[in-house]
Image (cartoon, rainbow, N blue to C red):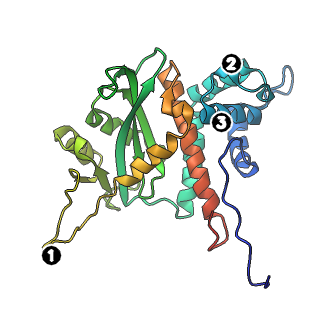
Amino acid sequence: MPASETTPEPPLPTIWELPDELWERVEPLLDRHYPPAKTGRPRADLRLVLDGIIYRLRSGVQWNQLPRRFGADSTVHGWFQRLVKDGVLEEIWARIATECEALEGLDWTWQAVDAMMGKARMGGAKRGPNPTDRAKAGTKKSLHVEASGGPLGVEIDGANVHDTKLLAPTLAATVIERPDPEELAQHLCLDKGYDNPTGKAACEAAGYVPHIRRIGEEKLDEAGEKTHPARRWVVERTLAWLSKCRAILVRYDKKPENYKGIFQLACALLWYRRLDRLNRPEGVFG
């Protein structure tokens, strides 16, 4: 092979455990929140704990069915709840997204929000009758993404809660600071479910240029051309990606904050895949 040619790096495989490069970013954050004790009982192996949480995210198994290689299931579950309560999983998400933004891998110009419903098998708050599933209990996930589908914020509630009621909380849940709308115009794409006074008011309050269209209906200029083609598909694609994680597809967590926490970890892993691509040599994509 000529010296000028390089073999493309293989794409990053599905993440079932923390890659070394991701652990290097996460470890200082964990040490800051949970510094190892100099005496007494040693702290749990938090890398192994996170690997166990990722396994549960991917597979959807019950906590007590985690493989023994991750240690005691009670330890993994206990630490998971602690990470959720302390906002550490959300902080990991924000840190990786911020690093992508620094590499110009985040586009604020066009954004989108959409929601999807899923089954909720166990009890707990933020569940409601799913109107598309014979009124069985379900949970709605409302997701906010940037132009390429990178997740920025998520909010959950019962499946019977209308999308527009979740719009303002979803926009407020953005994990990193948005640019000032006065300095950078930001367009927000929404489907027909948000075409009402509540949806429009939430857009206005957050300083967005709203693009709320019905299916097949786009704004045309004087020549009859689409001036702002719909960009709602990016959020639908991200929701589809996240739904491949079985612990997100069906909610088994009784505590809504735990279900939201597993969602936050999945969003962090999505951003890490983008960070991996951004850090590859120019022209080498996985």
Q: Residue at x 73, y 45 (%)?
A: 23
> Mark 1 highlights which residue?
223
Where is the N terminus found, in terms of image quarters? bottom right
Residue 211 in the figure: left or right of residue 176:
left
Relative to the observer, which residue lies in front, 185 or 110?
A: 110
> At numbered mark 2, what does the secondary structure look like: helix, strand or loop?
helix
> At numbered mark 1, what does the secondary structure look like: helix, strand or loop?
loop
From this view, report whether residue 134 is shown above or below residue 166.
above
Amino acid carrying label 2: it is Asn
Where is the C terminus found, in terms of image quarters? bottom right
Residue 262 visible here: no
Amino acid carrying label 1: it is Ala
Q: Residue at x 54, y 25 (%)?
A: 258
From this view, report whether residue 257 is shown above or below residue 152.
above
Q: Position of residue 154 (x, y in %)?
A: 44, 38
The residues tagged by marks 3 and 2 sit, at their Cα atoms, a distance apart of 15 Å
> Mark 2 highlights which residue?
64
> At numbered mark 3, what does the secondary structure look like: helix, strand or loop?
helix
Of callouts 2 and 1, which one flags the residue occurring earlier in the amino acid sequence? Answer: 2
> Mark 3 highlights which residue?
54
